[in-house]
Image (tube, helix red, strand yellow):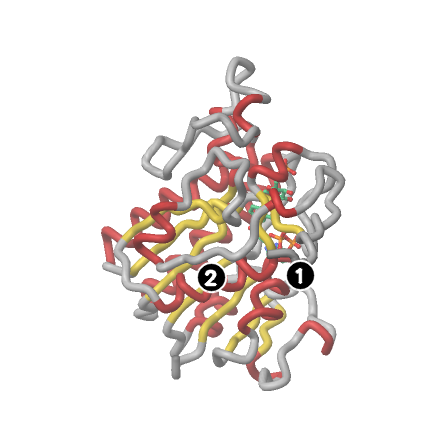
């Protein structure tokens, strides 16, 4: 891709997983309200391509999206316990500012970091903990209505609705990725829910790469690795985006240690 890609929330966990994986493949503009230390910035990104700004600052955001072909929007409050004033400002108002600026600037593709918590309410007492286990066949596929389990989830569902609105109003391609649980090197330790929705760093970078390269209109997909334990379908991400995850929490013990492959033997 020749035109720049704007990455908001670049200094955070998801932003760094993306830059670790595909940091050399795009001309990035990085936006975060915190200045990024050099170690978090890919070599080719100049100071001029780094924006220290709050996403609720309309002028700064308009400047950052000018001339950009695609946006990956991650900036926000990621806490499931975040209070209303924070999600209202950072996740709802901030997302509206970034999406509107992108649509008005003629951005072609917009990937929005939604969350498993937009549908946390489906994890009812009668479904859990079976839901988190490999032999349970209950699946959410992205066609279901949001069912948030907390105010953070409400803010993510609202971001999805904003995406729907701006796609319908302006034709901007919008994909909402309901990210599961991103951890580096191994799945969340001793946590069934987390292992069912694990997203490895490599699969995260690949998934957002596909969001930048694929053709779509408006989509909601689940962002998890190809875990044996899962209650989110990744079929839509495979079909529409060409997502081809390589990791699976079943290749690790419950404690998060890799399960050694059987050594090759000489026996026939
Ligand atoms: N880490 C995970 O497993 C998951 C993350 N997500 C979503 O992905 C996104 C990124 O999450 P993480 O990287 O884990 O969070 P993080 O807290 O590590 O990173 C967020 C980044 O955004 C910046 N930021 C926050 N509010 C901002 C604002 N108003 N203006 C400008 N910059 C702002 C922060 O300085 C930080 O660098 C969030 O929207 C989160 O809700 C969704 C599901 C799971
Ligand atoms: O949206 C998010 O979800 C993940 C997983 O949720 P959890 O309740 O199982 O921890 C969370 O780790 C992340 O911080 C959050 O942004």
* Residue 265, percent from left and from top: 67, 58
Residue identified by numbered label 2 = 208
Give the image quarter of residue 132.
top right
Give the image quarter of residue 241.
bottom left
The front one of 26 and 50 is: 26
Q: Looking at the rendered structure, which numbered label has been put on residue 266?
A: 1
In the rendered view of the protein, which quadrant contains the C terminus? bottom right
Relative to 264, 196 lies left or right: left
Question: Quick one: SS at disc 2?
Answer: helix
* Residue 87, percent from left and from top: 57, 42
Extreme residue toward the top, this view = 126
* Residue 190, percent from left and from top: 73, 35
Q: Does the numbered disc 1 mark a residue whose Cβ is under 8 Å from ligand 1?
A: no
- Position of residue 132 relative to residue 58, above or below, is above
Point out the frontmost of discs 2 and 1: 1
Q: Residues within 10 Å of mark 1 (few under 14, many from 20)?
A: few
Residue at left offset 56%, top offset 72%: 30
* Residue 244, percent from left and from top: 43, 58
The front one of 201 and 107 is: 201
Give the image quarter of residue 129.
top right
Q: Quadrant of ligand 2?
A: top right
In the rendered view of the protein, which quadrant contains the N terminus? bottom left
Question: Quick one: SS at disc 1?
Answer: loop
- Position of residue 149 relative to residue 263, above or below, is above
């Amino acid at each position: 891709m020749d035109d720049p890609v704007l990455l908001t929330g670049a200094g955070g966990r998801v932003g760094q997983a993306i830059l670790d994986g595909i940091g050399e493949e795009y001309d990035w503009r990085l936006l975060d309200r915190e200045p990024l230390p050099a170690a978090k910035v890919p070599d080719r990104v100049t100071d001029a391509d780094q924006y220290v700004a709050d996403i609720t600052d309309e002028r700064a955001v308009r400047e950052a999206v000018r001339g950009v072909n695609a946006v990956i929007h991650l900036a926000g409050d990621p806490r499931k316990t975040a209070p209303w004033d924070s999600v209202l400002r950072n996740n709802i108002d901030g997302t509206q500012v970034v999406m509107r600026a992108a649509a008005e600037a003629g951005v072609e593709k917009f990937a929005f970091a939604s969350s498993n918590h937009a549908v946390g309410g489906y994890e009812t007492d009668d479904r859990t903990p079976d839901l988190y286990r490999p032999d349970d066949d209950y699946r959410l596929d992205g066609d279901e209505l949001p069912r948030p389990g907390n105010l953070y989830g409400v803010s993510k569902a609202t971001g999805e609705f904003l995406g729907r609105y701006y796609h319908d109003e302006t034709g901007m391609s919008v994909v909402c990725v309901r990210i599961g649980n991103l951890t580096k090197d191994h799945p969340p330790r001793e946590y069934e829910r987390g292992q069912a929705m694990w997203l490895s760093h490599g699969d995260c970078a690949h998934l957002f790469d596909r969001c930048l390269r694929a053709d779509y209109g408006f989509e909601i997909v689940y962002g998890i690795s190809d875990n044996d334990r899962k209650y989110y379908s990744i079929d839509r991400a495979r079909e529409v985006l060409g997502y081809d995850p390589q990791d699976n929490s079943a290749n690790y013990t419950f404690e998060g240690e890799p399960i050694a492959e059987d050594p090759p033997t000489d026996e026939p």
